Image (tube, coloured by chain):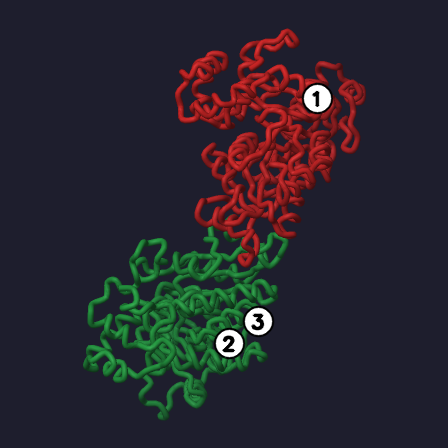
Chain colours: A green, B red
Amino acid sequence: MTESGGLRPAVDAETRARVALSRLSEPGDEQLGEAVQRLGAVATLEALRDGRLGGTRERHYRTRLGQVDVDLDLEVAGRAGIRLLLPGDDEWPAQLDDLGPAMPLLLWVDGDGDLAALTRRAVAVVGARACTAYGEHVAAELAAGLGDRGWTVVSGGAFGIDAAAHRGALAVDASTVAVLACGVDVAYPSAHDRLLAHIRSSGAVVSELPPGARPTRGRFLDRNRVIAALARGTVVVEAAVRSGAKNTAGHAESLSRPVMAVPGPVTSAMSAGCHELIRVAGAALVTDAPDVVDIVGDLLTDASPERRGERRPHDDLDAVTLRVLDALPLKRWVAPDGVGRAAGLDAPTTLRSLGTLAACGLAVTRDGAWRRAPAAPRATASS
Amino acid sequence: MTESGGLRPAVDAETRARVALSRLSEPGDEQLGEAVQRLGAVATLEALRDGRLGGTRERHYRTRLGQVDVDLDLEVAGRAGIRLLLPGDDEWPAQLDDLGPAMPLLLWVDGDGDLAALTRRAVAVVGARACTAYGEHVAAELAAGLGDRGWTVVSGGAFGIDAAAHRGALAVDASTVAVLACGVDVAYPSAHDRLLAHIRSSGAVVSELPPGARPTRGRFLDRNRVIAALARGTVVVEAAVRSGAKNTAGHAESLSRPVMAVPGPVTSAMSAGCHELIRVAGAALVTDAPDVVDIVGDLLTDASPERRGERRPHDDLDAVTLRVLDALPLKRWVAPDGVGRAAGLDAPTTLRSLGTLAACGLAVTRDGAWRRAPAAPRATASS
């Protein structure tokens, strides 16, 4: 067990201990999570190493002590451009804290987007691997519609509904996040190598498992809680009566996040799980992106115009922010100083307004450049 | 206006006045219905004739006075084997009284079944005329499943979902009732001549409109309230966002009867009305006959075995009634004395037990003959 090392003096002991613990433990272990929240990761790691931690899994975790090499994990990650996020970091999605002791010890992220910004307005779209052509079509349409409205689609990167959802978002140049049940450098499924590369370039591929970790059945189920926690709500597009997607829905429900399901033919076994969610578990029936946004959106910015009279998303914006909105192109990415020039505003004012617009879902950002969110109307067009 | 006549002295003045009023008025006229409930039909007819009734439609109704010929209506009906039911008659379905002043003044019935008995356990299955192959399939399966469980399917005899529902019930030799928006002797749609004949022979064709009356758009909508009132609940199988089936669902809701809807592909306009009913109007999502029976059935006799442990429909029957149940054949119709011989019981006891079994949905009767309801298990098979 190599745990100290001169190579990365900037990495503090707490971080190193979390990396070690994530290599030793399985995701979502609440006993371990409670110890870390109570004692800190350093003391928890020491207790585990000395056999003083207790808990049902300690003995199993201790057999892995020989596999811990924090420096190697950091080095592999660094070489692959994978960054490490800890709770409290600027880029850490604060909504994960709702998982309590089951929250991830850390996240490995590979991708160009800022994970906190990407998931500020995010919906999980999940479903069966062995989906039908209908499910694939609906998942892609739904994801594209959400993307058009400035929402990030979170899914699991798997075959079937997951892949269709990611692709639907990518098709409209929207952001999407894949949460994997293996290391973010592991191409699983290998046929999704190019899809995952595409997701990295317009969003992020995320995992709480260290680089190189392989997926297991348990890890798929534990991963689902992260998908549910990152998103404001979870939509199940197709699911058999027993399915992993319903597991994700269950996590969303225990987090008090809305669970939604797309209906389908009653003759299709792949819709039976969705119908059961609606019929028995009280999931909301949704048929398209506006239905979803009605449920997860903010009343002010997202309510569909016909359902709230003449109010528009920008009704409550100040005049300066409206100028910035009007200066933002819809089809092109522009740097903030370009936006400021077009709006006739100085850099700090422009940046502050861009932040407001992003928070309202009216502007999107990527690699430091900005554009109008596809569904955001020009302020002048409606006044 | 020929109203008195020596041909049918047995028909009392109240009956004759109701027949006249039904020829003069449009179905479901609450102003007229209130007058009939308050003054009786004879006085209401006199007031209408003298222009003393008031109400928005009186002037229009009075233009029809010349068309009233009660003797002719009774003669035409009698020749065609159509019988007349009045509120309070043994065969009058008491649940129609829930319509209050909008209840039918009378019903014309053509068919071999006893309407009150037929609709004691009835579900309305309705939907679009321009349905899809999916909707047709689901309606037929649902109706067959309901028929197998001893439930009568009520519908409107129209093209599309209605016809598929009637045919599904007929396919399993179950009872079905068609409520028409025209006279029961009018073949509308004419292509359904044979279907309606088939319905008459195993159930009933019903209308509140006099023989020969033609359907109008308003009459279709008014007819829907009778379908909703006859049944314990209404299932919409396929419906566009604007549709007559949703009108029937609305009537069911105002009668506090359960409204159910079958989901379908979100890509199908013919399922959009169903999804809206579930999403916005709070209709229950149902996928098959057991789902429907769970909602409209009696807790004791209908709860599906897996959802209520080991209880069976006959758990609460007395020993004598169980003997009658065991003596009833499933595939053959038997006269009550044949059942009594097989069970070793006298005629009054046998008839009383048969009545109990029918009330529990365990036996069905037709033309005075009896058989076991298809879904009713033999008492001895499960004990």
**Label 3: how many Cα within 10 Å (few below 14, some 14–19, many 20+):** some
In the rendering, at what x and y percent does residue A248 appear?
A: 48, 62
User: Which mark is in front, 3 or 2?
Assistant: 3
The answer to whether residue A82 is left or right of residue B383 is left
Q: Which residue is mark 3?
A: A159
Q: Check disc 2 and report its element: helix, strand or loop.
A: loop
Question: In the picture shown, does residue B259 fall above or below B111?
Answer: below
User: Which mark is in front, 1 or 2?
Assistant: 1
Q: Which residue is mark 2?
A: A182
Identity, as a three-letter code, of the amino acid under mark 3: Phe
Identity, as a three-letter code, of the amino acid under mark 1: Gly
What's the residue at 55%, 43% (across, down)? B236
The answer to whether residue B175 is left or right of residue A123 is right
Say which quadrant the C terminus of chain B sits in: top right
In the rendering, at what x and y percent does residue A118 appear?
A: 37, 73
In the rendering, at what x and y percent does residue A54 appear?
A: 43, 67
**In the rendered structure, which disc, 3 or 2, sits on the residue that comes first in sequence?**
3
When asked about the image quadrant of residue B204, the answer is top right
The Cα–Cα distance between marks 3 and 2, rounded to whole angstroms, is 15 Å
Observer-nearest residue: A319 or B116?
A319
Q: Do discs 1 and 3 belong to a common subunit?
A: no
When asked about the image quadrant of residue A357, the answer is bottom left
Q: Do discs 3 and 2 belong to a common subunit?
A: yes
Q: Which residue is mark 1?
A: B81
What's the residue at 58%, 67% (across, down)? A129
User: Which mark is in front, 1 or 3?
Assistant: 1
Say which quadrant the N terminus of chain B sits in: top right
